[in-house]
Image: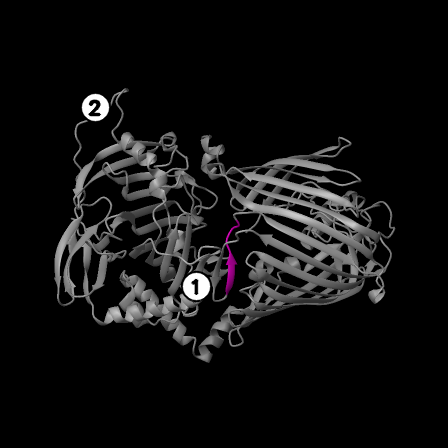
Amino acid sequence: MLRFFVLVLVFVCASNAFCQDVKDIYGSVTDDTNTPVSFASVFVKDMNVSTMANENGYFKLSIKPGTYTLVFRFVGYKSVERQIELIESTREDVILSKDSYTLDEVHITEKKEDPANAVIRNIISKRKYLRSTPSYECDVYTKGVQKLMDAPKRILGENVGKTLKLDSNRRGILYQSETQSKLFFRYPERKEIMLASKVAGDNQGFSFNRALDLQINFYDNTIKWAAFGNLQFVSPVADNAFQYYSYQLMGTIIENGLEIEKIKVSPLKKYAPTFSGFIYVIKGDGRLYSVDLYLTDESRINFVDTMHISQHYREVQKTHWLPSDITIRFKGKVLGFEFAGYYTGLYSNYRPNPVFPENFFRDEILRIEPSVNTFDDGWWDESRPVPLTKEEEQNYSDKKDVLKRTESKAYRDSLQREANKFKPVRYALVGQRIENIENNSYWFIYPLHNTVFYNTVEGWGARLRARHVKRYGFKRSLEIEPNLRYGTSSKTTNANVEVTYRVDTLHHASFSFRGGSDFLDLNSRGTVNLFYNTLTTLFEGKNYLKLYRSNFAAFSAQREILDGLMLNVGTEVSRRIPMRNSSFSSIFDRTAKMITSNNPLDPATEEDVFPINNAFSIEAKLSYTYGQKYTTRPDGKIYEPARYPTLMVNYRKGIPGAFNSAVNYDFFAIDLFQDKISAGLWGYSSFYISAGKFLNSKSLFYPDMRHFTGNQTAIYNPLFPNFHFLDFYAYTTNDRYIEAHYEHNFAGKFLSKVPLIRKLKLEEIVGGAVLAQPVTNYQEAYIGLQRLVFRIDYGLSWTPDKKVYQAFRFFYGF
């Protein structure tokens, strides 16, 4: 902690001291046609000082008076050096000409290949050495801008321009943010400490920019980035690059005393996970000098149509070549929204081979310091190395004006009234949110389809639910969720409330209480929701949902004990009452005859599935994820995707006698699971294994047994690890069991090779699951296709008696 404090102190003091005795070199970088060269690299020769031009080609470099040689470069242009004697702030406009590479005449025949191939082989032979650069730490400035270029006028009755604060042409900047960070690297580990953050329109917000996300290393075999979704792309210098690319030497040029080779990179096949563009290589050395690569729709990227990556490298202390800057530009169109933007990172003040404290790279990969959003506009004007464009300056100003207006209670009240207006379409589909800005809280009323329902136990009914959230600073919040439910046929009213107090988001610590009465699913893992059960009952005569009534009081608490080690404990006392059908309605007479009783074990009779009883139980769960990486923010801790499986131990005890409890059992289970295990270009896998046993089953009832997440409907939830075809209730056990699931997503590996179909960007899925227990066993296997939020599976299941069931399963959702 002391290291972080000293780091921030030195950062602020050095910035202030530096700014007191510096002058500016500023100007524009354009090409021969006076077109701005966006994001051109600008650095001081033989010094560890650099900047880059903004989107409009304007640059500013703050440095102490003296004599310097400035180098201006950008991929595709000839570098320019300027000798500057800096006494006072000086303007220096630079024109970059398109590069003109010389190429010796080469006759390429079947026996004589393009000279570029030898260059690529040389890089590949040194790839592992070049990839594992020496340890270093450096300063990183990032900026991210996302713009809306066009949008529909209305969505779900909402005025898009007004809601997103766009101009009259429905254009505007949706997100704009800058950060200043320290980056630490020791192959293969990385760590970032964010010291300053600025977000347009939110002076208390924390930037989503991360220097870590801009760490793209083309010496790796595959390039994986969060924006690519599930896909990975083959590097042009990967070990197997010749299976994916063809190369053409465009020529050589002398820059800064180095002979640079320009190589054109082209995919061998369309719709392969590959880049197009150019790479620039230091001749004979095998090092990348710069890259200018792009991905298009043919590369099967999602959400965007084009993504352009420009990266420059520079020599540090005459011993290492490290990234000097990177810019990622993108544009796309989704559902009528046309957007564009960029993320850029500037690296400076490299310090090779530092000594890191023990366990410095252990689990935390990013720390956002509490003081990041305390720096004012004046500090940013002096410290930002890349100037803002006029549009970006105006966006900061406009959103700052809006923030000032929110200081007025009258203005806040007007915003609140507008936001809280009741809109029937919005309420029916997504619910109604009622803000209280002064109190830092809100109410959310659940939508209509979660309110009105029908089932055979209650008949037609209404479930009135709302959630109240009150925040106390960054780390504490209180959530209260009251629930009122009435059934017209059963003539029963249930009321309950759930209260959750989150006391420490840094350690995921919280306390929860639930109390009242409710109709609960006999399968505690859940079956179908009330809305879908309403549809299947009325239109198909399939009343899947089986209910019982419970009067209950429960308490639970959880906390992260150590990094990756989570403890959850709870206790509950309840009175459980079996229920019978009280309504048999269906739209069609023939389907009404298919309605079954509320007893899933004997659906043909109205016998109770268990007697009225009281139950008192305690439960404890302990989960551990080895090497769990995380981000520490002032408002809490965010886990990164786990690199290793999670182990969970669960113990539940039914205690007889207390509160007239009639249960007496001991249940123990061990789970091992991991989601999205990368398989490189072959996609990713997920698995889940669970084994458990009732060590003591002297007295327990159907709700106490071990249940499984089955499915019997065509529309299903593909949340892993749910079964596709397992009966909701038939496989419940009071003995021992073993459950296993496996699923692999090939991320379009095969269908990308099929003409026409590959344009759909479908992802192939295969999977299966098994359940073994003393009464009977169960297996299933399936194949599927997925595109974003849409998925269709076809599979079959079978049991030891050879009974086979096969069907399609569908899913859609946002």
The answer to whether residue 419 is above or below residue 94 is below
Left or right relative to 663: residue 424: left
* Label 1 sits on residue: 368
Find the magenta span and give its range.
Answer: 636-642
Q: Secondary structure at mark 2?
A: loop
Can the viewer see residue 210? yes
Residue 581 percent coordinates (x, y): 82, 54
Residue flagged by tag 2: what amino acid is it? His
Residue 131 highlighted magenta (yes or no): no
Mark 2 or 1: in front is: 1
535 or 11, nearer to the observer: 11
Image-quadrant location for residue 498: bottom right
Q: Residue at x 72, y 37 (%)?
A: 778
The residue tagged with tag 1: helix, strand or loop? strand
Residue 717 visible in the shown view:
no
- Image point 42% across, 68% down: which residue? 2
Cα gap from disc 2 to disc 1, whole angstroms:
56 Å
Residue 641 lies in magenta, yes or no?
A: yes
Residue 745 appears at what percent x and percent y?
54, 39
In percent of width and height, residue 270 lies at 39, 33
CB atoms of marks 2 and 1 within 8 Å: no
Amino acid beneath label 1:
Ile
Q: For mark 2, does the 10 Å Cα neighbourhood hold few (<14), some (14 to 19), or many (20 or more) residues?
A: few
Q: Residue furthest bottom?
A: 409
Relative depth, front residue between 136 and 279: 136
Tag shown at residue 107: 2
Depth check, front residue: 805 or 587: 805
